[in-house]
Amino acid sequence: MILDTLGCRICIMGPSGSGKSTLATAIGRSRGLPPVYLDQLYHRPDTNWQPRPAEEFTALHDEALLGARWVMDGNYSRLLPQRLARATGVILLDVPVMTSLLRYLRRAWFERDRHGGLEGGRDGARWAMIHHIAVVAPHSRRRYAEMFGGIGLPKVSLVTSQELARFYRLEGLDR
């Protein structure tokens, strides 16, 4: 089983709408690893996704890293070196842009209590996020793929919805 090789501190990276939070929740349930959703640490609860001050986010991030066991979803590349220094394995999700966009719209319009959602936050389709997924994220995807190639930890890359579904099935994960 692939998950067993990734250890007890797993980083999940990938663009918005790729399934990071859902996968973190599934792995957490299956392996007894507390999920850490970086979006929840980065944004203030009970807001419309307003960021915390950078030093506050960094302190929360670094505190979460001290845990003996976790599965952490999110990118926040500025803090990736600290994460990788503590991680025992990495998963990169890189589903197609259209898949990410459709997942974002589905969660914005239809999902009330989603994995990794912001407590008290209001999810809704926002043009800035649609632009980010469709225009900005493709450039980040290339950067993440390059970074992923240089990571010396056990790792797995899932680049299609079919690969991700197969991973769930083979690892006995429930969404």
Image (cartoon, grey):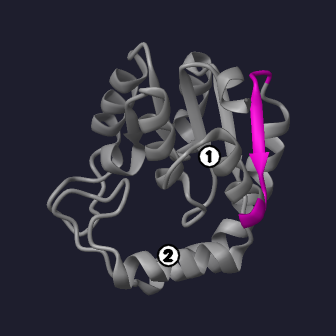
| Cα–Cα span, label 1 and label 2 | 16 Å
Residue 27 spot, x, y in % from top left: 51, 38
Coordinates of residue 160 in the picture (x, y in percent)? 77, 63
The answer to whether residue 156 is magenta is yes
Give the amino acid type for the residue marked by disc 1 in the picture: Met
Disc 2 is placed on an element classified as helix
Residue 149, image quadrant:
top right
Residue 106 in the image: x percent, y percent? Answer: 46, 81
Q: Is residue 50 left or right of residue 145?
A: left
Q: Identify whether 69 is placed above or below 31.
A: above
Q: Residues within 10 Å of mark 1 (few under 14, many from 20)?
A: many
The residue identified by callout 2 is: 104
Three-letter code, disc 2: Tyr
Which is nearer the eye, 77 or 156? 156
Q: Are there few (<14), some (14-19), or many (20+) residues within 10 Å of tag 2?
A: many
Q: Quarter of the image for the N terminus: give it.
A: top right
Q: Which residues are magenta?
A: 152-162
N-term-proximal mark, 1 vs 2: 1
Give the residue at mark 1: 13
Q: Residue at x 47, y 52 (%)?
A: 21
SS type, badge 1: strand
Where does the image place residue 78, in percent across and percent down from the top left?
55, 39
Say above or below: 20 vs 113: above
Which residue is rendered at x = 75% and y = 22% of the image? 153
Which disc is residue 59 wearing?
none
